[in-house]
Image (cartoon, rainbow, N blue to C red):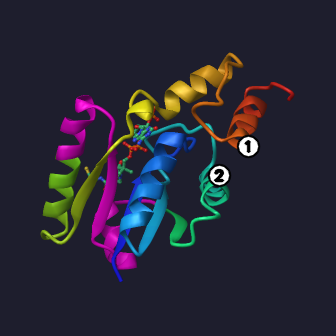
Amino acid sequence: MKSAIYPGTFDPMTYGHLDIIKRAANIFDEVVVSVLNNKEKTPLFSVSERVNILKEATKDIPNVRVESFEGLLTDYCKKIGVNVVVRGLRAVTDFEYELQMSQMNRKLSNHRVETIYFNTTLKYSYLSSSAVKQIAQFHGDLSAFVPDFVAKLLYERFGYKE
Ligand code: COA
């Protein structure tokens, strides 16, 4: 069975992430989407909230599992026995950071962990979780960027009653 990990902060998950998850699930037998408990970022949603959002959004994709992790990605890969990491590339600006990360992960894992990139579907190439949060803060239209239930959670978090 070929499995892959799609790691990220997912604060919150957007249609851009969902697009990558669906496409990876078409290729791999199993996709483990894993939310990083990232102490360097101050997330809007807790780890369990972010996990629940991803679980709800992927509930109809049987070969997707949602988890969370902290620490080094390569340690987590070893722990769950998966050596393929999936990431999305939105634009050339993502490339340098992603290249550095994949090379570091290969080194840290003694060349066991490989990273595979999906080029993001064009209509999501400008999308980011920060942009989505900014739009929500001013009660802007989120319908093209996140599922309705995520938009509702975002508006609530910024004090809007739907
Ligand atoms: N569609 C929409 N948005 C996307 C996207 C896509 N396909 N792909 C990335 N993004 C956005 C995210 O929304 C996020 O936006 P934001 O900055 O506005 O919040 C941004 O791109 C990057 O987020 P994410 O993909 O979650 O990556 P990250 O940089 O937060 O985390 C990890 C990447 C989890 C893989 C990495 O930090 C990690 O492995 N950490 C563990 C520590 C470790 O092992 N370090 C050693 C390796 S260097």
Judge from the rendering whether residue 81 lies leftward or rightward of residue 162; answer left or right. left
Q: Is residue 65 above or below residue 44?
A: below
Q: Say which element carries label 2.
A: helix
Q: Is residue 9 visible?
A: no
The numbered mark, 1 or 2, whose residue comes first in the sequence reads: 2
Mark drawn on residue 141? none
Instruction: Look at the image and say whether residue 43 sits in the magenta stretch.
Output: no
CB atoms of marks 1 and 2 within 8 Å = yes
Picture quadrant of ligand 1: top left
Q: Position of residue 26 (x, y in %)?
A: 42, 65
- Which residue has dot 1 on it? 149
Quarter of the rendering occupied by the C terminus: top right
Could you tell whether 121 is left or right of 130 in the image?
left
Residue at 61 percent across and 51 percent down: it is 50
Q: At label 1, which amino acid type do we have?
A: Phe
Cα gap from disc 1 to disc 2, whole angstroms: 9 Å
Image quadrant holding the N terminus, namely bottom left
What residue appears at the point 28 percent right and 31 percent down from the top-left corner? 91
109 above or below 153?
Answer: below
Q: Position of residue 31 (x, y in %)?
A: 44, 67
Check mark 1 vs ligand 1: CB closer than 8 Å? yes or no.
Answer: no
Q: Nearer the viewer, residue 19 or 4?
A: 19
Q: Amino acid at mark 2?
A: Ile
Query: In the figure, residue 2 lies in which quadrant?
Result: bottom left
Query: Does residue 28 appear anywhere in the picture?
Result: yes
Is 40 positioned to the left or the right of 18 in the image?
left
> Could you say where residue 103 lies in the image, as x and y percent from the top left?
15, 53
- Which picture quadrant has residue 136? top right
Which residue is at 47% across, 60% downward?
A: 34
Task: Tell me, for residue 53, which label it has, or none.
Answer: 2
